[in-house]
Image (cartoon, helix red, strand yellow):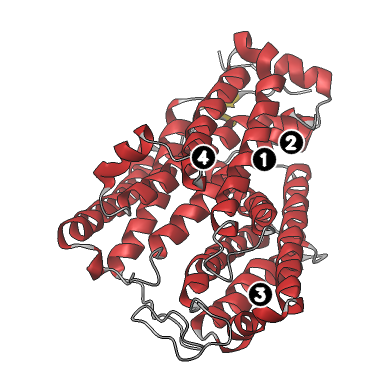
Amino acid sequence: MKRIVYREWRIPSARYWSILGILAAVAGLATLAFGYMEHTGHWVSGMNNSVVWGLPHVFAVFLIITASGALNVASIGTVFHKPIYKPLGRLSGLLAVALLMGGLLVLVMDLGRPERLIVAMTHYNFSSIFAWNIFLYTGFMVIVIAYLWTMADRQGQPFNQSVGILAFVWRLALTTGTGAIFGFLVARQAYDAAILAPMFVVMSFAYGLATFMLVLLFAFDEEGRPIGQKMLRRLKNLLGIFVAGALYFNLVYHLTNLYVTKNDGLESWLLLHGGIYTLMFWVGWVLIGGLLPLGIIYHPVLNKDRNWIVAACALVVVGGLATMYVIIIGSQSYPIQMFPGQTILESGFFDGVNGQQAAYHPTIPELLLGLGGVAIGLIITVVGVRVLQFMPESLADDVVALDEETLSQEAFVTPS
């Protein structure tokens, strides 16, 4: 029986620096975009008085819930005692911290006055869900770093399960809090739904695992490290369950709205007459992010091909971005119904104007700012696996087929 050995990512230096250079270039463009919007003002973005959360928030929220979902791989190994997932725990924790930092950076840069973040950090309004999330986000990073220590250091091994359980509970609270940001906003008709909180949890499972699989497969293929069919089968089957769960919550959310008469206008607009939002819902959220990946994952031939598995993961990520676009921007674009049935009351913000959606057109600076958050998350991951031993040397079938006792004994082997 082979031992589990963790090694740094040892791709050729030229290849490593080219990857890092591309990511740094994207992050640099995002910095320039931030400087341009900060100096000129947010009027150069597509945001307006109705749509106050634009494309950067789509990327930021996607990265935040994906970070939570990426940690799910480590949680399955530790909390649910599945030994096959334990060799992936270190990379899972690193990616979770990296993506969260990228998402939070986008949020800070999109505030308009990022220097005023210190006010939010020193003056708390606990009647606001945003104040709660400051503690959830910072606590998540501290706990996951401690979790990584228990996985990488023999002295921390006795605390691995207890810290893992804490990280698991905390990440559920974090994603629930993120979904509650929207679910608690009663002013927006599409947001006012308690189901958004658990729906965000399930979506985080799908997006986090898909992103984790893309990073894992890319890193292993670049260096030629083996991944056995047993590991791939477990991961892609788990992804299928999470994608199906996300579609289920989506179905329940809209069936509930259709049952409530006051939401007929909202559902008719979103599902049939919402223009770009209707297109992104059916094509992006349902088809690309749901049905197509499920078709690949459960196809008897395609699900055995690694390239098709990568395609399924990429479709889930693209569909996730489309989902966030519909939830965040589409919900703001639907006009606020100040008085149900009232068609005379109007304002410059389109409040009470039936059938007239707020116009929002994303701009290049917003897109660059969002992509910058992705680049920052990947830079942290690339540097981390390069300088520290986050990845197992092999995930071949004869390595991952370890029982609990053997895996516990060999979990901290490092190269001589």
Q: Which residue is mark 4?
A: 132
Q: Which residue is mark 2?
A: 76
Whichever of labels 3 and 4 marks the residue nearer the N terminus, that label is: 4
Q: Nearer the viewer, mark 4 or mark 2?
A: 4
Label ID, residue 287: 3
| Residue 149 can be seen in this image | yes
Q: Nearer the viewer, residue 188 or 302?
A: 188
Give me the residue at 82% from left, 23% from top. 404
Query: Helix, strand or loop at disc 2?
Result: helix
Quadrant in the picture for residue 81: top right
Q: Give the crowd class for mark 4: few <14, some 14-19, many >=20 residues within 10 Å.
A: some
Q: Give the crowd class for mark 2: few <14, some 14-19, many >=20 residues within 10 Å.
A: some
Task: Using the numbered discs, state the Cα–Cα distance from disc 4 to disc 1 in whole angstroms.
Answer: 22 Å
Q: Nearer the viewer, residue 165 or 309?
A: 165
- Pointer 1 with pointer 3, Cβ within 8 A: no
Q: Nearer the viewer, mark 4 or mark 1?
A: 4
- Pointer 1 with pointer 2, Cβ within 8 A: yes
